[in-house]
Image: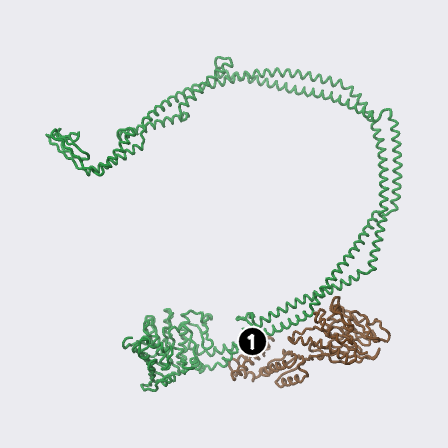
């Protein structure tokens, strides 16, 4: 038995912080479906199980509702098994009733009740749909008693957090990690955790097929699962489904050479135009280097798909040369010295010191520009 | 530089040569009236030093004299750095320029122009203009002294050089100002001028609006999402409940339970109906028994009543004769008493007649006593009436009125006046009768004697014996006609009055007034007699009263049969006698009336007793007859036996019914049980109705919630809420970023601004130090606040005041003082330039102008001060050198 395990499509998720690029990210999530179909065809797979959170909201608009269905329709030979998750639980007249009312083709299956579903002659899917956003009980418990013919594969499909597994799961819907053993499951396909993860030999989180945040899975993936027969250990192979890479880098900059090094390393990342980069910078830079850093960031921002820089921990350290660049003496130099004193005043409020630092950088940049204009 | 002399020709009012002499160091004053040409001289100095000789600018054309065919020529002698120079320039026509040093020409034409500038340290400006340097600062033209000095480039350079030679340069000031200007410009884009709030069209305000917008959108979408969540929850609950109450087993159980309850109730209700029927029969039997017993009781009562009435009839028949006897006795006593009462009544009537006669005689006696008084009154009235008649007759004969007499007096007065006037105007007839002529001469009818003189008012005959008759006829006087008219009027009035003269009229009027007084006296007498105004009528009334008294006396005597009236004593005695009789009769009548009433009551009682006994006897007989009709004596026993038998049968039937009812009651449910079954049926029916109502309500709710959820799902409220949340976060971040940026810029601006202010304060210290003595002369303790480029921004005394808010006079005084201080500063740094003030210090009061003179004198220690003024008396105390304009030819 070979199938693809995916989860957490979260179609309709908004990305307003990306401004005009939002639509590209939304389209990328839909492109995942086509990519899964292609993978299925190329690997001889007839079933794709999606372990919850097909939609990001249980009240998507009509276009968002239809879009994934329309992307699945062209793959008529593939059976798509969709399970409600905590983002899109099945409730009366909710998102899944609306999907059902669209008139689905026979290859798209909505698993809205905990009922065994035959995947061919020798395999059964045991879905555990969420009927509300938060369940206090383990809704996969019914699998222990789910009847299937002897000798048939039993594949569980659920969405939630494995008990005592990590505290940063997306929902509190608990799933017993012993479920596979208790319910004699050959494979338990899970969703909710946005990273590909093997919990037990036969229990896997597929991870998100298209990341939606930095700090998680960098590249969107799904799992190609191959089970030789009942009781056999599953063979699980990640396959790439994502368009954009979401990466986070934390760097320390204390001089211009570190800045140049960072710039070189970031620019060596593959496929910059599809890179979403979050950069956490810390350190202390001279004013000249600080200004150079800002220029490099501006350049890099134009090179990647999106750049988010957190420089709250990057401080400006005015060097003697910086201050002399402002002036050797006189009004401006005294102003710079006064701001520097404020920066170094440990009794001053942190936000005031931070503001003084920005003011000093601003002064430096303005005076350098003025000098440049005057020289021109 | 020290100006030593000036001559002007062909300029303004100076068509011919005018020379100003008397220049010296210190203060120089040219005090002259208006239109003398002071300002022309000032312009001439400026033009001579700063303008090219061949220039044709408007300033130079203005300098030229309209009616002069000569060029405008200015010659200025001055000393500079110990050398004597004379520059002479001619403008407009045949322009030329010559500069001499110590009497030796050192330059001519354009070179002379430039050489002057070189000597004075000023430089050509752009184009053909020049920068006048310190001269532009210290030479103040007419009307310019009110404005604060703003040094030009050259002057600033000189001042800066002087300052920097003392305190060094203000480094970075210009860049700092530019930086501050740029920062302020950016802040202005975001904040209002006061920086108290965001500028309405700025990025900060837009971001704030955007943030508010997204907060509202988020709140709105959250509300919708919460509503959707609530609808989901409600729909789930409704469906679960719908599933529960539509369970067929439960519904069937409810229906069966209701049917069982209804059957049980029907059985109980039928048993209750049977009980009610038996109860009705039992009640009927009881009523039949009661009827039989009642009839037996009534029969026995009739029998008893017949026997009793027969006994009472016999007793009454025995008492009836006794009642008749008592009635007759009472009637006899009453008749006796009424006879006695009639006798007494007759006596009373007789006495009343006697009393009536007595009273009539008494009245006649009273009236007789008034006869004498009436007779006296009648006599008085008669006398008064005669007097009044007599006076009225006399009054009718004297009809003259006071107004007529007044009119006559007025005519006499006018005639007398006219006569006097005529006499005065008339000729006088004077006759002197000699002794021999006595008796021979007559004037008119009067015999003349001695001297006689009278005016001749009318033709007058003078008869002299028989010798002659001389008629003197006066000329007709114009007043004569008036005199005649008055005479005619008086004659007419006298005739109408019936008198011959005015004196007679006066006598008649006096007589009439006497009569009128007498008449008023008579009326006063009549009033005292209460007789009104007509004494005749009063007399008639008195006579009538006398006649009436006589008649009444005659009538009284005739009625009583007497011939004369009794005396008053006799009448009083009779009255006493009659009163005693009347009292006795009244007591007797009252006693008889009381006895009569008592006897009448006794008669009525006796009659009542008799008739009552008769009526009772008749009623008893009637009752006996009626009862015998009901129960004849012959049927009495048989009827009693039949009724006793009927009562016994009713008692047996009633007992049978009661026994049956008690037996049935023991076998059926009681009322409480029936009521319980009824309540159970009602409860089950209500429960079924509630079930159906709930089912309908649930189906309605499910339909409504389904519609709402579908609508919300179609709107994509979840997606919209997520988008609104992110937009709100973005807007918050942008708002915070702009606010932080503003705070950073404000910090930078304030820091740089503070350092710039400190630097400027230090830089301006030399200016301030030179200014201080001057300022102290007028404004002790005051300090000027200087801004960029030596501008005066304010003055600090007890508090800081904006320069622009100071009075015009104070502004001018400060402006002049600042120029003096700057001049002193430059003078100390070898930049000695005269100070020229043309018509300055216009608004100084007496105190201030003296203080300003002190300041000018103080400045005069360092440099030449030239004051041009038209206020000769006010500037006399200034002292200094007095400049005079020397004219050659007509000025």
Q: A209 and B623: which one is in front?
A: A209
Direction from residue A249 to residue B379 in the image, left or right: left
Colour scheme of the picture:
by chain
**Judging from the image, what is the letter of the chain drawn in brown?**
A
Q: Position of residue B609 (x, y in %)?
A: 73, 21
Q: Is residue A93 left or right of residue B55?
A: right
Up-down relation of residue B298 to residue B207 (above or below): above
| Residue A61 vs residue B309, the one in the foreground | A61
Quarter assignment of residue B438: top left
Q: Is residue A321 visible?
A: yes
Residue at mark 1: chain? B
B641 horizontally vs B495: left or right: right
Q: Quick one: B14 or B738, which is closer to the camera?
A: B14
- Residue B546 in the image: x percent, y percent? 44, 19
- Tell me what hue chain B is rendered in: green
Q: Which residue is mark 1?
A: B745
* Residue B166, position as x, y percentages in the image: 44, 82
B526 lies above or below A38? above
Quarter the C terminus of chain B occupies = bottom left
**In this picture, is B222 found above or below B170?**
above
Image quarter for residue B374?
top left
Q: Position of residue B134 (x, y in %)?
A: 40, 80
Residue A164 appears in the rendering: no
Q: Residue at x 64, y 79 (%)?
A: A309
């Amino acid at each position: 038995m070979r199938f693809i395990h995916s989860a957490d499509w979260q179609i309709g998720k908004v990305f307003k912080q990306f401004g005009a690029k939002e639509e590209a990210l939304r389209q990328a999530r839909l492109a995942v479906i086509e990519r899964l179909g292609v993978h299925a065809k190329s690997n001889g797979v007839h079933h794709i199980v999606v372990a919850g959170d097909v939609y990001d909201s249980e009240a998507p608009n009509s276009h968002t509702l239809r879009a994934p269905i329309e992307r699945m329709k062209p793959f008529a030979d593939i059976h798509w098994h969709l399970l409600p998750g905590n983002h899109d639980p099945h409730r009366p007249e909710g998102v899944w009733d609306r999907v059902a009312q669209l008139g689905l083709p026979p290859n798209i299956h909505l698993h809205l009740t905990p009922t065994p579903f035959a995947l061919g002659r020798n395999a059964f899917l045991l879905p555990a749909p969420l009927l509300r956003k938060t369940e206090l009980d383990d809704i996969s418990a019914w699998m222990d008693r789910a009847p299937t013919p002897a000798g048939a594969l039993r594949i569980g499909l659920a969405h939630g957090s494995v008990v005592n597994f990590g505290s940063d799961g997306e929902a509190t819907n608990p799933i017993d990690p012993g479920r596979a053993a208790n319910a004699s499951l050959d494979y338990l396909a899970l969703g909710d955790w946005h990273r590909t993860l093997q919990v037990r030999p036969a229990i896997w989180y597929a991870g998100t097929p298209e990341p939606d945040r930095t700090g998680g899975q960098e590249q969107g993936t799904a799992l190609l699962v191959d089970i030789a027969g009942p009781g056999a250990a599953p063979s699980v192979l990640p396959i790439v489904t994502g368009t954009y890479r979401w990466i986070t880098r934390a760097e320390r900059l204390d001089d211009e050479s570190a800045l140049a090094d960072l710039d070189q390393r970031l620019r060596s990342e593959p496929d910059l135009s599809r890179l979403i980069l979050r950069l956490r910078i810390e350190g202390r830079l001279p004013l000249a280097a600080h200004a150079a850093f800002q220029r490099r960031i501006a350049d890099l921002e134009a090179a990647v798909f999106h750049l988010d820089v957190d420089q709250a921990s990057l401080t400006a350290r005015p060097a003697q040369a910086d201050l002399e660049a402002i002036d050797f003496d006189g009004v401006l130099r005294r102003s710079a010295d006064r701001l520097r004193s404020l920066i170094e005043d440990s009794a001053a409020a942190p936000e005031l010191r931070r503001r003084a630092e920005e003011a000093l950088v601003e002064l430096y940049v303005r005076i350098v520009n003025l000098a440049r204009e005057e020289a021109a | 530089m020290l100006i030593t002399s000036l001559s002007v020709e062909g300029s303004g009012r100076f068509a011919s040569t005018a020379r100003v002499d008397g220049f010296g160091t210190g203060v120089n004053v040219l005090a002259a009236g208006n239109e003398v040409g002071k300002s022309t001289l000032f312009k001439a100095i400026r033009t001579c030093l700063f303008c090219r000789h061949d220039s044709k600018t408007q300033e130079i054309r203005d300098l030229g004299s309209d009616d002069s065919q000569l060029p405008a020529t200015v010659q200025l002698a001055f000393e500079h750095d110990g050398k004597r120079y004379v520059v002479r320039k001619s403008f407009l026509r045949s322009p030329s320029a010559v500069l001499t040093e110590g009497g030796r020409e050192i330059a001519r034409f354009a070179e002379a122009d430039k050489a002057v500038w070189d000597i004075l340290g000023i430089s050509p400006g752009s184009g053909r203009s020049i920068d006048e340097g310190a001269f532009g600062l210290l030479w103040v033209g007419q009307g310019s002294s009110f404005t604060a000095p703003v040094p030009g480039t050259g002057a600033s350079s000189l001042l800066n050089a002087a300052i920097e030679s003392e305190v060094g340069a203000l480094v970075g000031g210009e860049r700092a100002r530019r930086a501050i200007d740029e920062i302020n410009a950016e802040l202005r884009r975001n904040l209002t001028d006061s920086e108290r709030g965001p500028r309405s069209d700025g990025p900060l305000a837009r971001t704030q609006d955007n943030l508010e917008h997204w907060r509202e959108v988020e709140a709105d979408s959250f509300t919708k999402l919460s509503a959707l969540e609530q609808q989901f929850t409600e729909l789930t609950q409704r469906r679960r409940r719908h599933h529960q109450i539509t369970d067929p087993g439960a519904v069937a159980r409810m229906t069966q339970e209701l049917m069982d309850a209804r059957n049980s109730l029907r059985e109980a209700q039928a048993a209750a109906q049977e009980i009610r029927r038996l109860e009705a029969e039992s009640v009927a039997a009881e009523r039949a028994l009661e009827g039989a017993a009642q009839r037996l009781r009534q029969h026995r009562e009739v029998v008893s009543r017949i026997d009793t009435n027969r006994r009472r009839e016999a007793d009454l028949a025995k008492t009836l004769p006794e009642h008749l006897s008592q009635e007759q006795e009472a009637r006899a006593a009453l008749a006796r008493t009424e006879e006695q009462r009639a006798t007494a009544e007759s006596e009373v009537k007789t006495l009343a007649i006697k009393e009536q006669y007595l009273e009539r005689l008494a009245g006649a006696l009273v009236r007789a006593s008034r006869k004498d008084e009436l007779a006296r009154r009648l006599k008085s009235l008669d006398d008064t009436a005669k007097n009044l008649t007599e006076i009225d007759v006399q009054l009718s004969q004297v009809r003259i009125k006071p107004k007529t007499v007044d009119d006559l007096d007025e005519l006499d007065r006018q005639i007398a006046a006219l006569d006097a006037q005529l006499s005065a105007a008339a000729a006088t007839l004077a006759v002197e009768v000699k002794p021999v002529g006595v008796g021979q001469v007559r004037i008119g009818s009067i015999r003349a004697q001695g001297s006689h003189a009278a005016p001749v008012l009318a033709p007058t005959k003078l008869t002299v014996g028989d010798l002659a008759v001389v008629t003197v006829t006066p000329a007709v006087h114009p007043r004569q006609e008036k005199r005649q008219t008055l005479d005619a009027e008086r004659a007419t009035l006298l005739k109408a009055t019936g008198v011959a003269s005015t004196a007679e009229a006066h006598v008649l009027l006096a007589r009439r007034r006497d009569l009128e007084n007498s008449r008023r006296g008579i009326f006063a007498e009549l009033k005292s007699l209460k007789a009104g105004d007509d004494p005749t009528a009063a007399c008639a009334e008195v006579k009538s009263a006398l006649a009436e008294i006589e008649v009444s006396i005659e009538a009284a005597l005739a009625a009583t049969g007497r011939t004369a009236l009794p005396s008053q004593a006799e009448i009083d005695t009779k009255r006493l006698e009659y009163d005693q009789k009347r009292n006795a009769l009244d007591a007797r009548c009252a006693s008889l009336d009381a006895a009569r009433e008592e006897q009448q009551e006794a008669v009525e009682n006796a009659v009542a007793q008799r008739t009552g006994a008769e009526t009772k006897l008749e009623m008893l007989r009637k009752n006996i007859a009626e009862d015998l009709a009901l129960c004849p004596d012959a049927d009495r026993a048989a009827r009693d036996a039949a009724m006793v038998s009927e009562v016994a049968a009713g008692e047996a039937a009633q007992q049978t019914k009661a026994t049956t009812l008690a037996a049935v009651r023991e076998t059926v449910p009681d009322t409480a049980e029936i009521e319980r079954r009824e309540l159970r049926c009602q409860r089950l029916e209500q429960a079924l109705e509630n079930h159906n109502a709930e089912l309908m309500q649930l189906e309605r709710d499910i339909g409504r919630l389904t519609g709402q959820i579908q609508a919300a799902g179609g709107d994509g409220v979840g997606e919209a809420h997520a988008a609104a949340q992110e937009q709100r976060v973005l807007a918050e971040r942008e708002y915070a970023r702009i606010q932080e940026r503003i705070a950073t810029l404000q910090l930078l601006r304030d820091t740089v601004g503070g350092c710039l202010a400190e630097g400027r304060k230090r830089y301006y210290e030399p200016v301030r130090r030179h200014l201080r003595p001057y300022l102290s002369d007028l404004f002790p303790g005051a300090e000027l606040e200087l801004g960029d480029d030596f501008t005066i921004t304010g003055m600090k005394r007890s508090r800081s005041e904006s320069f622009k808010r100071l009075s015009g006079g104070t502004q001018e005084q400060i402006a002049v003082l600042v120029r003096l201080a700057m001049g002193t500063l430059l003078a100390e740094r070898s930049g000695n330039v005269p100070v020229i003030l043309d018509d300055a210090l216009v608004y100084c009061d007496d105190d201030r102008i003296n203080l300003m003179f002190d300041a000018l004198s103080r400045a005069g220690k360092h440099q030449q001060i030239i004051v041009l003024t038209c206020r000769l008396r006010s500037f006399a105390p200034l002292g200094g050198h007095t400049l005079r304009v020397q004219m050659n030819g007509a000025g």
